[in-house]
Image: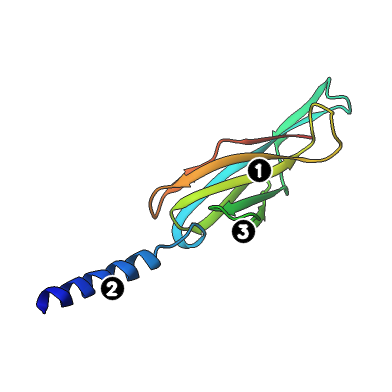
Amino acid sequence: MKYKICLILLFLVSVIFYSCKKEPGKGGNATIYGKVYVKDYNATFTVLQEEYYGQDIWVYIIYGDDRDYGDRIRTGYDGVYEFKYLRPGKYQIYTYSKDSTIQTNAMIPVIKNVEIKKNNDEMQVPDLVIFN
């Protein structure tokens, strides 16, 4: 009888443990941050006119396997963005750029993949380089 009770308790604890696993997203103590770097070309992308860290540019974050972004933020005066209070998991950080191949007038995404392995991680993303 004690054996059956122990098995039932073990089963219930394991169900509770696995059902409480938190998905990537807000609610943790980790941070992802980086900068957006702008290369400003002429209309035909043949002459680089200026390079700088872009201010007031939207940067997006996708939590785990979500299909749409979970949050967005604008860069500061120095091109810096920061997503705080994240849980461990996989994330995609992205912004939009002009197509330097001039094959389309549409904006194209510049994407970086990031994985937070533990709470309190601070992950710096390599610069998101965009064309303007």
Q: Marks 2/1: CA distance?
A: 49 Å
Residue indicated by mark 1 = 79
* Residue 79 percent across, percent down from the top left: 66, 43
Residue beneath the point at 56% across and 52% down: 65
Which is closer to the viewer, label 3 or label 2?
A: 2
Question: Residue 113 occupies which quadrant of the picture?
Answer: top right
Dot 3: within a 10 Å radius of its alpha carbon, few (fewer than 14), some, or many (20 or more) residues?
some
Residue indicated by mark 2 = 12
Position of residue 46 in the picture relative to residue 31 (left or right): right
Front-lying residue, 116 or 40 = 116
- Label 2 secondary element: helix
Dot 2: within a 10 Å radius of its alpha carbon, few (fewer than 14), some, or many (20 or more) residues?
few
Q: Tell me which numbered mark, 2 or 1, is placed earlier along the sequence.
A: 2
Residue indicated by mark 3 = 70
- Compared to residue 37, the image places residue 95 above or below, namely below
- Residue 92's label in the rendered image is none
